[in-house]
Image: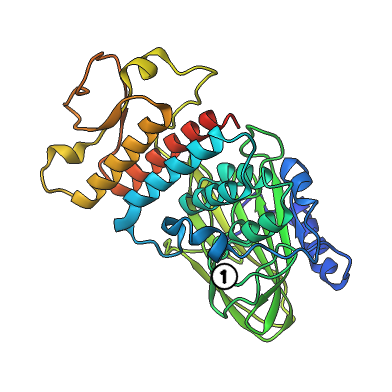
Amino acid sequence: MVSPPHRQPGSVQALCCLALMALPSHQSAPTVVLPAGANARAWAGVGRETRAVDLGPELFKKQPWLQPGTPRADRRAVWRGWGTLVKKEAQGERSDPGTRAALCLFATKEGRWRDAWNHLERLGGHPAWSAAVLPALLPGVPFDAPKGQGGLPGILDDGVLLRPAPPPPLTPGTRYQTRESIVRGLRIGAATVDLRVTLDNSGIEVGLLHTSGAAVRVFVLLPEPEGLEIRVEYIDWMRQDERHGALELKLLPGEEERALFGRFKRRRLPLPASCGADLPRALAAGGLWFSWPGLDSPGEAAELEEELRTAAEAMAALLDVPGGLIGIHEPPPRPPWNATIAHLPREAAEARRLLSAIASRLEAWVLRD
């Protein structure tokens, strides 16, 4: 058995674990606990009996590109829809909860966790919308999962895949402060389960505690904060030789909390800086262009090319500047030539990751969040 050095007996995490194991028996304990901060204050308006908005007619019918299981081929519609929503929210006299909910779910889908929590915070005055959206972040259920009350999902299938978000930041702009989110009373199959997500500067831990009912299987995909990737994973502190995506646990009645842990390393991908109050002169005058090596190899990944081109055009349109996709040896197609050019990696996952990070910065600047 290999135990990461920062998890020592008697540690704060161990005490938190014991506290979590003791709490479910108290009916007065809150079902969702967020770290003290803006999100916790916004969530305070959601009660145990709060009924969630039905996202089917209220959201997915209006924004079909957000439907669960949207194929990669439809990513052009996704980026166009995102740009339209951001512009609509920016131009409105007041924040629209449906728009914020859609932006929250899209950010969740892209793994832009800070943006997702920020949009959820803006839903603080709309408890029914908050209760509808939170389960996608905590415990991280599919968008079309059944809705329960008080911010919990309905009864989930045995073998459900959970993709919980890292806990929200305690203060704006912080990344790696130690913090924890808890959700109690999850119904999975014939079992009731508590889930805990703890983040610190070395990794992310997901704890699952079977509190009642029959044995159940759960799959968990550990999240990766921006700029970090999981180097190695542990199941109950047993190091896994390879990363296989979702980790499987069988939760049994009467057993102690099961723990999944992912140790971080910094991702070797340059991240964009945030804009100031005004756009940089080169960006405002020359536009925003994305260069991609795949354009220099005709026929390579045509589907990815169209997705990147649509995303580039959507981002430029959001800023009301010229823009698009160009090859790595190609200048912007119009003067002035001092435009801003973002160089995307050739590999699809890395190109999408950088594109998503740029979208995050642009969205925050346009919405002034």
The residue that label 1 is drawn on is 145
Q: Position of residue 302 (x, y in %)?
A: 18, 49
Quarter-wise, where is residue 149 in the image?
Answer: bottom right
User: Which residue is at 43% across, 59% downward?
Assistant: 64
Q: Is residue 359 above or below residue 79?
A: above
Q: Quadrant of the N terminus?
A: bottom right
User: Which residue is at 62% across, 57% downward?
Assistant: 133
In this view, the residue in front, 241 or 127, is 127
In this view, the residue in front, 129 or 141, is 129
Q: Is 234 on the left-hand or right-hand side of 188?
A: left
Look at the numbered disc 1 and give the secondary structure of its residue. loop
| Residue 238 in view, yes or no | no
Q: Say which amino acid is labelled 1.
A: Ala
User: Which residue is at 59% across, 46% downward?
Assistant: 100
Q: Position of residue 190 (x, y in %)?
A: 66, 85
Q: Position of residue 120 (x, y in %)?
A: 64, 48
Query: Furthest residue to the left?
Result: 298
